[in-house]
Image (cartoon, rainbow, N blue to C red):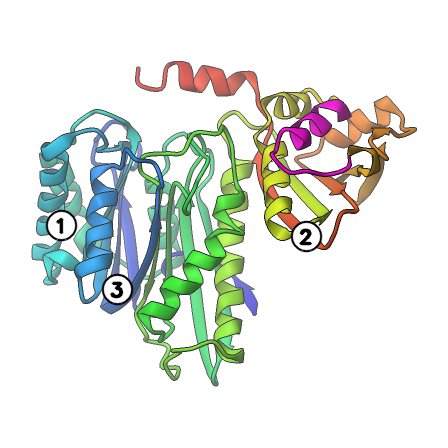
Amino acid sequence: MKVIEGGIVSARGFRATGTAAGIKYQGRKDMAMIVSDSPCVLAGVFTSNVVKAAPVLWDMKVLRQSDYAQAVVVNAGIANACTGKQGEESCRETASEAASLLGIPEDSVLIGSTGVIGMPLDMEKIKNGIRAMVPELGNAAENGKIAAESIMTTDTIPKQVAVQVEIKGKTVTIGGMAKGSGMIHPNMGTMLAYVTTDASIKKELLQSMLERDVKDTFNMVSVDGDTSTNDTLLVLANGMAGNEIMDGEDEESRKFFDALHYVNENLAKMIAGDGEGATKLLEIRVTGAANTEDAKKLAKSVTESSLTKAAMYGNDANFGRILCALGYSGVQFNPDQIDFYFEAEGKRMMICRNGQAADYNEEEASALLAHEKVVIDIYLKEGQGSAVAWGCDLTYDYVKINADYRS
């Protein structure tokens, strides 16, 4: 596998762009479009929140009923959630406008929205945005960057990644982009993430791969414990790499799965590190749990702990908060045999030995926690289970951002 520069348009046959449609923000891009030159096999996972936004319901229908997908239209600023029949009609009008201009079926157009919940979309702005984007579609790296920037809300950076891998003698490319900064606690996939590939693969295999991989990537991320109404992760595969079609589990499809995992994991980590108001990425590693499921619960419990996240913001080596979070995870373990370390920039420090404070220097520990990426490495000595979760610190700015998000 080779990591390359790029994102959503790195794979053959994909074009993208973005525009400033004035949906909610002024003076910044807030709509994106992705189009494939040929029909795509589609896979997707969506929010487990009972309250699902209209675009989520639309995309679930396309995944379930359509023969193929070929385009995605995304807007930022307004989520089109909790908008009833009007929200559903907005999705239909969006798909219809894009389909007409692109010359593709309406039911091959996917839709994504992110932003304020409860507000209706101004369809004239949406349609004008689509009309502006279609002539600007392109496959240059700048096109992908523009698209990634155009789906941001409170994000501070665009999030994109791309890789290449050899599949049965052909070079296959996978690229992706994502947005997410707040309301991050996925129980499916992510906030909004789109992955494109020129691989030739059966729909059932791609869906199976995505469902398996999301459990170890996007589902292991938490910023604030809130599962969004709009969480959507879509993968489009147009087959233009020309590889022999992948239709089962073998060594070649495993290489593709590993590349897909790399893209998903890196997008997930970018989201965690760009949490609203965050100053650092936290990586929680758990080793020696009784089994994998226990390890995941333990890692996520620490990631989601507001007290631990606040301590990380203050560079406070408060080991008790971490032990506490492990203790209420719902997993049974012996607290008298837990060890854990803090790690950053190649430095490693034991903080807890056998469930008690280790002999460490508070000032040195605080200095270590001041880095932009901090690893909390936890050992339970219960079995072979291991897992990794990602999150961020909890800062004053998180409250400021969300206190006036609508206004």
What residue sits right under mark 1 in the picture? 95
Query: Residue most toward the right?
Result: 359
Q: Say which amino acid is labelled 1.
A: Ala
What residue sits right under mark 2 in the picture? 385
> Counting other residues with Cα less than 10 Å from the Cα at mark 3, is it few (<14), some (14-19), or many (20 or more)?
many
State the residue at coordinates (42%, 57%). Answer: 211
Report the Cα–Cα distance between label 3 and label 1: 15 Å
Q: Choose between 101 and 108: the one closer to the eye.
A: 108
Q: Quadrant of the N terminus?
A: bottom right
Give the x, y percent position of residue 235. 35, 59
Q: Say which amino acid is labelled 2.
A: Gly
- Label 3 sits on a secondary structure element that is strand
Write the start and end of the magenta stretch as one range.
317-334
Check if residue 24 falls in the magenta segment: no
Q: Quadrant of residue 368?
A: top right
Q: Choose between 138 and 292: the one closer to the eye.
A: 292
- Give the left or right position of residue 256, taking residue 336 as reference: left
State the residue at coordinates (79%, 45%). Answer: 346
State the residue at coordinates (39%, 40%). Answer: 191
Q: Is residue 178 above or below residue 249?
A: above
Q: Earlier in the sequence, mark 3 or mark 1?
A: 3
Check if residue 320 falls in the magenta segment: yes
- Label 1 sits on a secondary structure element that is helix
What residue sits right under mark 3 in the picture? 36
Q: Quadrant of residue 25?
A: top left
